[in-house]
Image: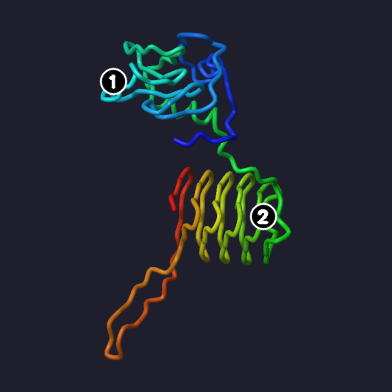
């Protein structure tokens, strides 16, 4: 796991409070990063959810670990929760702010053919290209170099990473995350045989992605 320089250091007591877990140890202990149990060092927090990793608890240099009840470790701090894996995931969110910093509005370098459907609380970053009759809901963010074809609808609170291509007629719901360089709604490459050779079948449907979906690159 990367130790990013832009983490938000938190005390162990604050972490325990925010993830609704029990604390054993010094509540003032400062945690700066999350790391694997076998490579963690001072200022790091780690976890053990699988018993095959329990052996690392005796040698880990982590300042704190997240553990289920009944498992002990010689660490300065322990966060206790019945689901250490989920709890550690929530702690990562506290330490690392992964939200892209993009203010609402349309960047001056973007090409917007029809701005009427773009909510004032949406963000369109640099070098994006939005065709006609595109709608973008409040809180949605198109980070940079995103192409959006004609008649595309993007819902609220979506996060569209750089280089994404959303082709004509696609429909994206609310709270959707689409990672870099993904293509939505591209040609399906259908062909029919004929006496003159292969006849390309025109793709006249569309792609519809419903709410709360995350699509990898």
Which picture quadrant has residue 11? top right
* Residue 118 numbered mark, or none: 2
Q: Out of 194 and 129, give the one closest to the viewer.
A: 129
Residue 125 image position (x, y, % from top left)? 65, 54
Q: The N terminus is located in which quarter?
A: top left
Please determine whether, in this image, residue 119 is positioned above or below residue 20: below
Residue under the image location 66 percent in, 50 percent down: 123
Residue under the image location 47 percent in, 18 percent down: 63
- Residue at the top extreme of this rendering: 25
Q: Is residue 127 left or right of residue 206?
A: right
Q: Is residue 24 left or right of residue 198?
A: right
Q: Out of 119 and 216, give the one closest to the viewer.
A: 216
* Residue 34 numbered mark, or none: none
Which residue is labeled 1 in the image?
55
Please determine whether, in this image, residue 48 is positioned above or below residue 28: below
Front: mark 1 or 2: 1
**Dot 1 or dot 2, earlier in sequence:** 1
Mark 2 nearby-residue class (10 Å; few <14, some 14–19, many ≥20): many
Residue 205 image position (x, y, % from top left)? 43, 66
């Amino acid at each position: 796991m990367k130790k990013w320089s832009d983490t938000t250091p938190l005390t162990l007591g604050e972490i325990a409070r925010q993830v609704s877990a029990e604390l054993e140890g010094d509540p003032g202990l400062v945690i700066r990063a999350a790391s694997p149990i076998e490579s963690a060092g001072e200022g790091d927090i780690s976890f053990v959810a699988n018993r095959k990793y329990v052996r690392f608890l005796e040698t880990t240099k982590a300042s704190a670990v997240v553990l289920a009840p009944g498992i002990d470790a010689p660490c300065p701090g322990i966060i206790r929760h019945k689901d250490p894996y989920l709890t550690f995931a929530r702690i990562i969110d506290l330490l690392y702010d992964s939200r892209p910093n993009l203010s609402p509005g349309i960047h001056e370098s973007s090409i917007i053919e029809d701005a009427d459907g773009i909510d004032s609380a949406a963000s369109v970053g640099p070098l994006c290209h939005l065709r006609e009759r595109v709608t973008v809901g409040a809180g949605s963010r198109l980070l940079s170099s995103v192409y959006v074809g004609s008649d595309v609808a993007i819902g609220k609170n979506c996060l569209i990473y750089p280089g994404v291509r959303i082709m004509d007629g696609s429909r994206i719901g609310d709270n959707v995350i689409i990672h870099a360089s993904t293509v939505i709604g591209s040609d399906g490459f259908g062909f029919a045989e004929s006496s003159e050779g292969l006849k390309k079948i025109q793709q006249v449907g569309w792609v519809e992605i419903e709410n709360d979906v995350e699509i990898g690159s």
